[in-house]
């Protein structure tokens, strides 16, 4: 079982990496790009047999407290 | 008075901080991040560097070090804590200071002298900075762009918690004087209680003339004066 956490900068936070990548995509000829946001992807491997609901609850807490900074970032958590 | 200077793996401004305050005639000692007590410290300096390799986010891992529990308790009891550069990032991640530091707007690491002005003398970190003095102090960071949501910024302004702002040589808060894109040109803030502060510039690297500027010493002199006043009041 794996937990997948995607962390992205909040809309209100200036994202210079996203803007730079967007500009580079423009130079490569991709003209239909409205915006780019650069974030992080964290994959957590869980011990086989882990209770999914309990893991989800614990990882939401970890994502909120540690893996993301809620002042500047949003996150999405999936367990599969 | 006694300064405690924290050391995390990859702190690298700890020796400079110790040197700066010893030079002003005060005692200072290192406190390793695994220690759980600050003993008789009167002020804690969280120094610059790249604690834990800046993994995940700057300061995100250092805040879980055992010593940070002691720092939190020390701050809760009214002790003075100052975070410099990475130390500022650690204190925001620990929730001891509002806001966050993100990538510089131009994605460049900036290592240069900048001009800085104290917004208010009303704090233990700015009280001795001569009125109207523009401080010339170096910065050295890639992630020093101060961010807080609008509500937090309004609160910072209402409570006079913005302590330092980037400015030009004449003290004007211009866009070009802002090296990293910080909101409101913010270089440093304090908490609501005014006993915890953080700033991105390095006062310890500008505390004696041989370094090209001794403007940074006013920040340490402010701290020393505040602690001495507190000790005198206690003894009276």
Image (spheres, rainbow, N blue to C red):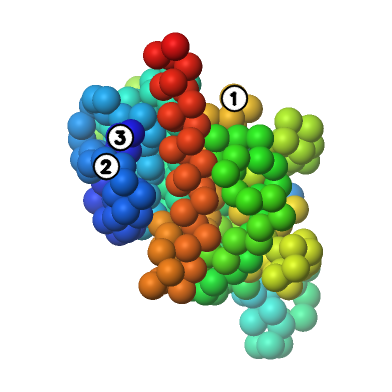
Q: Label 3, secondary structure: give it.
A: strand
- Residue B102 image offset from top left, x and y in percent: 57, 55
Write down the chain letter for disc 1: B
Asked if residue A28 shows in the view, the reply is yes
Nearest to N terminus: mark 3 or mark 1 = 3
What is the quadrant of the C terminus of chain B in the image?
Answer: top left
Q: Residue at x 51, y 41 (%)?
A: B222
Q: Check disc 3 and report the residue beneath it.
A: B2
Q: Residue at x 32, y 58 (%)?
A: B16
In depth, the one of B216 and B163 nearer the eye is: B216
Q: Check disc 1 and report the residue beneath it.
A: B193
- Residue B41 image offset from top left, x and y in percent: 31, 29
Residue A1 image-quadrant placement: top left
Labels 2, 3: one chain? yes
Q: Residue at x 73, y 31 (%)?
A: B159
Work out which residue is located at the far front of the displayed protein and give it: B236
Q: Label 1, secondary structure: give it.
A: loop
Q: Residues within 10 Å of mark 2 (few under 14, many from 20)?
A: many
Q: Label 2, secondary structure: give it.
A: strand
Q: Residue at x 47, y 63 (%)?
A: B214
Q: Are marks 2 and 3 in contact (CB under 8 Å)?
A: yes
Nearest to N terminus: mark 2 or mark 3 = 3
Q: Residues within 10 Å of mark 3 (few under 14, many from 20)?
A: some
Q: Check disc 2 and report the residue beneath it.
A: B28
- Residue B128 image offset from top left, x and y in percent: 57, 44
Q: Indicate whether A57 appears above or below B88.
A: above
Residue B194 image-quadrant placement: top right
**Distance CA(mark 1)–CA(mark 2):** 24 Å
Q: With B166 as the anchor, is A61 left or right in this view? A: left
- Residue B11 image offset from top left, x and y in percent: 30, 54
């Amino acid at each position: 079982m794996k937990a997948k956490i995607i962390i992205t900068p909040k809309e209100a936070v200036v994202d210079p990496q996203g803007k730079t990548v967007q500009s580079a995509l423009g130079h490569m000829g991709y003209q239909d790009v409205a915006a780019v946001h650069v974030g992080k992807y964290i994959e957590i491997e869980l011990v086989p047999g882990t209770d999914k609901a309990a893991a989800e609850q614990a990882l939401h807490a970890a994502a909120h407290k540690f893996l993301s900074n809620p002042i500047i970032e949003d996150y999405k958590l999936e367990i599969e | 008075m006694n300064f405690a200077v924290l050391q995390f793996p990859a702190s690298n401004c700890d020796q400079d901080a110790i040197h700066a305050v010893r030079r002003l005639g005060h005692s200072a000692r290192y406190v390793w991040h695994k220690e759980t007590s600050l003993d008789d410290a009167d002020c804690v300096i969280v120094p610059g560097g790249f604690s834990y390799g800046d993994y995940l986010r700057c300061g995100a891992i250092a805040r879980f070090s055992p010593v940070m529990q002691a720092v939190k308790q020390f701050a809760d009891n009214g002790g003075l804590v100052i975070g410099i550069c990475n130390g500022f990032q650690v204190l925001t991640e620990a929730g001891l200071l509002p806001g966050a530091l993100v990538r510089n707007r131009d994605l460049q690491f900036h290592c240069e002298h900048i001009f800085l002005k104290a917004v208010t003398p009303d704090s233990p970190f700015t009280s001795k900075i001569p009125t109207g003095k523009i401080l010339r102090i170096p910065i050295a960071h890639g992630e020093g762009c101060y961010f807080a949501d609008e509500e937090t910024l309004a609160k910072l302004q209402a409570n006079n918690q913005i302590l330092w702002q980037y400015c030009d040589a004449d003290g004007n808060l211009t866009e070009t004087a802002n090296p990293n894109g910080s909101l409101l040109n913010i270089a440093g803030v304090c908490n609501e209680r005014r006993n915890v502060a953080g700033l991105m510039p390095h006062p310890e690297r500008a505390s004696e003339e041989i370094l090209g500027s001794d403007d940074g010493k006013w920040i340490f002199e402010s701290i020393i004066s505040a602690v001495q006043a507190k000790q005198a009041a206690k003894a009276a």
